[in-house]
Amino acid sequence: MSTVTAAETTTTDRSLPVVLKVEGLNVDLRTPRGTVRAVDNVGFEARAGQTLALLGESGCGKSMTAKAVAGLLDPIADVDGGEILLNGTDLARLSPKQRRKFAGPELGIVFQDALTALNPVYPVGAQLGEAFRIHHGLSAKEAKAKAVDLMRRVGIPEPEARVNAYPHQFSGGMRQRILIAMAVALNPKLLIADEPTTALDVTVQAQIMALLKSLREESDMAVVLITHDLAVVAEEADTVAVMYAGNVVETGRVADVFASPRHPYTKGLLESVPVNAERGAELNSIPGSPPELHKIPAGCVYQDRCPLVQEVCRAERPKLLPVVSKEPAAADGATPRAAACHFSEELDK
Amino acid sequence: MATPLVQPGHQPPTSDALPEPFAVPPLEPPAAEAAEAGDKKPGLFRLLLRDKFATAAAAVLVLVGLTAVFGPALMGDLATKQNLLFANKPPFNPANGWEYFLGSDSLGRSVLARLVIATRTTVAVALPAVAIALVIGSLWGVWAGYHRGWRETVSMRVADVIMSFPSLLLAVVVLYVFNPSIANIVLILALTRIPIYLRTARAESAELQSRTFVDAARTFGAKPNAIIGRHVVPIVLPTLLTLATLEFCYVMLAESSLSFLGIGIQPPDVSWGLMVSQGRQYLQTAWWLSIFPGLAIVITTIAANMLAAWLRIATDPAQRWRLALPRKRLIARIPAKTVEGDK
Amino acid sequence: MTETRIQSNDRPLIEVDGVTKTFHVAKSASGNSRLRALDGINLSVRRGETLGLVGESGCGKSTLARTLMMLERPDAGAVRFDGTDPFGLRGKELLEWRRRVQMVFQDPFASLNARMTAGEIIAEPWKAHRGLYKTSREREARVRELLHMVGLRPSDAKKSPQEFSGGQRQRIGIARALALNPDVIILDEPVSALDLSVQAQVLNLLNDLQQRLGVSYVFISHDLSVVRHVADRVAVMYLGRIIETGRTEDVFEHPRHPYTAALMSASPKLDVSGAERQRIILQGEIPSPLDPPSGCRFRTRCWKAQDVCAEQAPGSEPAGKDAGHLAECHFPLETLKVRSGELAPMP
């Protein structure tokens, strides 16, 4: 039995080194209905030892953004402009071959579905050791020893005995641990976790989140957490970038953004969560559903669902601009807050 | 605050916190509505005309059908009339007259006329054989797969027995005992091909019966046969029809091997398969005797296959939109999945 | 917790008494091939109320739902609906029972036949219940009414399911369940597959329909915040048993079973006030239902487990002042407040 305090490192120190800086990233998708922009001018920063959450609903482009950063886009998707700076190197300009050198030592990725992300015909030890064989040139035996260490590090009981077991012999939570072990094998500077707990039960989800947190603190990794779950963001992340229809609509410290959202979408999402409402009371829902990619309107992407919509919203897409808050606390040297809304100041309570 | 509703049930957020100038304006209904109605559901026939290959395939099949129905009447006794003056004439020689356009056999009979007559026999054997096997095998398979349990086990064992018994041997025995009439050939071909449909239908039906919408139908109190008719058959049918067109080819060839053994179509009746086997011994000297009926089999089969492939997409509402696209884009159609896949 | 009151007007709509369901599966490592999905389930659903059924994957909540729908037959125990055992019904009576109990499924994509239009899907139940709406004009009018009721347009009747978004599809599923004017609807994770912003719309719709139609809900979910929002009473399931049940406030405010407390503590909270919250993080995962632990099923993950827990299965102990609040535990937690962090330190 262990207890963990959920106290957040609520201060975001600007002196922490920026590990990943994405700027103006566009991803185009070739579809039968023509080319659509799945990720549109997206930018964010992830700092060492901190967790940045990419928050959004299905189809908002958050996974696409992560795949672009990791270089794992489908062949039908292209990065069309933008910079992906990982410790100063622009990944977007690297050849696939150069990029492979980064996968592992610099950047690790954890997927949602641990069962399909592991090869069913190899023992987990061999899959865990692969990174060491490729990047450090270790022998099979040395790699296996490393795999045992890794399994112990991510909390898999009896690693010596289980290193030769196959993925299907592990439970869902254990498989996710193995996936995390693979991602952190070479102590990457950046860990991308794409919905790492969505397929898991809450009690297991808590274990995995605690593990990610301890790994992050241990090695000062930057973590990019992709999720649709507001509560997970509230508990696990330091900063957040809220995405909608391929655009970042709001960024800032989680505490600030969730306490006083400055984009109507963020506000609507927060009010949709049933937690604070009385039983049986009407929830504040957002009408309609997100636009399909080929039907994203000109002007503000959120205009069709927004309660604040005006003429200007239909005519002109708002830029992601720093917001000034009446509360001085949010302005002092912390991660700047920004929102892409013509009326974000009106939302300031 | 009076807020016009978009749709009943879609409550706009209560905007207490919002300053007065931001009264909620009425939202327009999604603009997509009108646009979608435009490109919606063109008739099956118009959809067919958009696809060149499918149209050609359909035309070939219509031609084969018309030939089978009206051809023999047009040809009269041309197919049986012997003319030793015109024996073994090669094809494509206009000097020999239109009836010998596709050449003639050693007795001077017109290959064209025989091909036309044979069309009727071939269709008359293959079509009922395929149809009977399709209907019996599919219904049996769907029923077995839906109910699972002993019904499934028994059915599969029966299918195994039929499949493991050499069908040609069975045909030889049956057709020696009974006389090799067209009806008997049809029945024996149908019987040996039933397991093909039975297995496919069972597999698909067993998978479908565990689907949620089938469960939903059970919760209304719908009877098993009603569920099979409403939810299982319409989904399995395109697969089975595709299978049936492939089987069409197999049955034509099986009929020709029976004819070759002398227990199939009996001369003076003639079928494409029989023509191929009769012409086989003249392959060195008169290639046209077996090549043209062979081509007829191949072209008919390919046409049937292409139409079936098209029909499979056209009858599936989830795929139908692909046919509405300009032809070129069909090639790059994989993306659609990835758009949805981003969760 | 057998219901002893037999007054007809007070009688629960659904009573489940000691229901057990075993599946035969491929042998497990220990040679056991009997998977006990439900093990002595007792519960009741009253008229017009919402019973929340909470638990993690593999706890048996979907099997319970399927048993309530008569899609599975229990090996032992009794289900009574309005006093009668639905498993004994035949013919017209069975059909009438089917009419009164309907279900909404989790996956709005899999639960609608893609080859039918929305109107056909909603009208489908009437094909088995021909007496309900006799003329096609009546049926069409009712389809339009139902579409309106769930917040769709009458013109949507002609569209096929793939033209709708996930939330709209779930509305069609709800309209289909309402088509037979049921007394109770089993909702199996009805919003889990939906995006948050759409989830709230559907929850509002369900709430609104209940108030208008007086229908009872059995609301199955793994999402505690959703259950807390909709349910009057909750039952928490673990490995085929209901380990705690009671009024929603009682169970959420004062959980008595360690598992309930851990479940609530583990689910992330949307609280950015920075207040420290103590969390119970359970070790391990749910044991395989093929080889459940002896005695108390939760003991392998429980921090309060003693020898007695392995030897003897705990009975249902009334907890607190409300007699309806029951917990199956040898060492029920004292008034514990998970959210305020008063949780006693654990060994």
Image: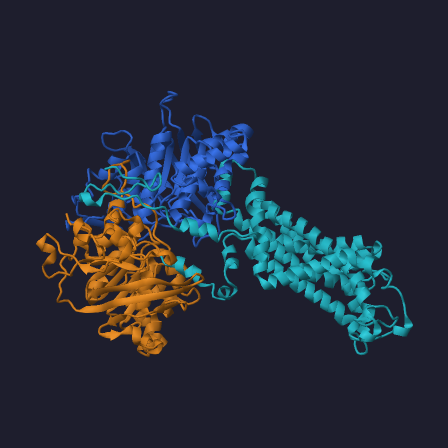
What percent of the width, then of the height, locates residue C64? 41, 39
Give the colour in which the image draws chain B.
cyan
Identify which residue, A252 or B176, lies in the foreground: A252
Question: Residue B279 is drawn in which quadrant?
Answer: bottom right
Residue A255 visible within the image? no
Give the colour in which the image draws chain C.
blue
- In the depicted structure, whether residue A329 falls above or below residue B280: above
- In the depicted structure, whether residue A74 falls above or below residue C233: below
Say which chain is orange. A
- In the depicted structure, whether residue A57 falls above or below residue C226: below
What percent of the width, then of the height, locates residue C344? 17, 45
Identify which residue, A31 or C272, lies in the foreground: A31
Q: Quadrant of the N terminus of chain C?
A: top left
Residue B193 visible within the image? yes
Q: In the picture provided, is B139 more to the left or to the right than C298?
A: right
Question: Residue A70 is drawn in which quadrant?
Answer: bottom left
- Please say which color scheme the image uses: by chain
What percent of the width, then of the height, locates residue B253? 73, 64
Q: In the picture provided, is C13 more to the left or to the right than A93?
A: right
Identify which residue, A327 or C237, lies in the foreground: A327
What percent of the width, then of the height, locates residue A4? 19, 53
Question: Residue C154 is drawn in which quadrant?
Answer: top left
Residue at the spot 56% in from the left edge and 60% down from the top edge: B50
Identify which residue, C313 or A91, lies in the foreground: A91
